[in-house]
Structure formats: C-alpha cells, structure tokens
C-alpha cells in the first residue's frame, strides 16, 4: 500500500498560490512601469514586498494591488480645499494605468 496523497494549504499542487507571488520584473510588466519603479516603490514602503534573501524579493500581487488601490480610495475620500503638496503626492494604481 502507498501513503495517501495529503496536500496542505501551504503546498497546493495546482500552483494557484505560487502565481500570486511575482518577481519585480513580472510586477513591472503587469503594472506597465519599469522594474526600477517597482523596486523604488517597495523600498519606500508604498507597496508590500517579501524579502526572501538580501537579493531575492517577491511581491504578493493581490496585496500590491490593494495597496495601490487603497491609496487611490483614501485620496478620493479626502476633500481638500487646496491641492496636495508635491511631497504628499502618492502614486496610485489609477496613476499607473
């Protein structure tokens, strides 16, 4: 008899979980920006990133999209009498597309 095929949530065999994490290059292509822009946004903390090693970084696509979209929603909810100062400007997902 062989052992039953047990699949944990962390090790899905369909690869769905794996496709949610992307490289900087893949994220840049998806957002249609440069890879340098993606790395700068991560370094500034404007998008979430998972650092696996000092040189290996992955991005959780749903979390990145939520972070970019969340900033756009927060900015639109604020009713400002004067336009924001350039140093307060935030890049939103809408700005990228």
Image (spheres, grey):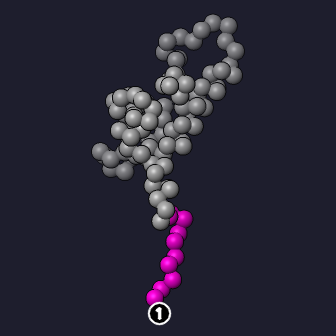
Q: Is residue 49 above or below residue 80?
A: below
Looking at the picture, tell me which residue is in the foreground, 7 or 40.
7
Q: Residue 93 in the image: x percent, y percent?
A: 53, 28
Side of 72 relative to 22 (left or right): right
Give neighbour class at mark 1: few <14, some 14-19, many 20+ (Cα, 10 Å). Answer: few
Residue lying at 46% horizontally and 88% vertically, measured from the top left: 2
Q: Residue 59 in the image: x percent, y percent?
A: 44, 43
Q: Residue 35 in the image: x percent, y percent?
A: 34, 32
In the rendered structure, which segment of residues is drawn in magenta?
A: 2-12
Residue extending furthest toward the left: 55
Is residue 10 highlighted in magenta? yes
Secondary structure state at the residue bearing disc 1: loop
Q: Is residue 92 visible?
A: no
Q: Main secondary structure of the magenta part?
A: loop
Q: Is residue 85 visible?
A: yes
Looking at the picture, tell me which residue is in the foreground, 86 or 59.
59
Looking at the picture, tell me which residue is in the foreground, 88 or 66.
66
Is residue 97 highlighted in magenta? no
Residue lying at 52% horizontally and 76% vertically, measured from the top left: 6
Residue lying at 51% horizontally and 38% vertically, measured from the top left: 64
Side of 72 relative to 40 (left or right): right
Residue extending furthest toward the bottom: 1
* Residue hosting label 1: 1
Say which quarter of the image contains residue 83. Answer: top right
Residue lying at 44% horizontally and 36% vertically, measured from the top left: 30
């Amino acid at each position: 008899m062989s052992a039953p095929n047990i699949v944990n949530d962390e090790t899905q065999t369909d690869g769905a979980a794996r496709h949610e994490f992307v490289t900087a290059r893949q994220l840049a292509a998806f957002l249609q920006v440069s890879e340098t822009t993606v790395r700068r946004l991560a370094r500034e903390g404007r998008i979430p990133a998972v650092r696996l090693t000092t040189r290996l970084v992955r991005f959780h696509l749903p979390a990145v999209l939520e972070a970019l979209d969340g900033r756009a929603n927060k900015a639109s909810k604020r009713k400002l009498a004067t336009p924001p100062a350039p140093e307060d400007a935030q890049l939103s997902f809408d700005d990228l597309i």
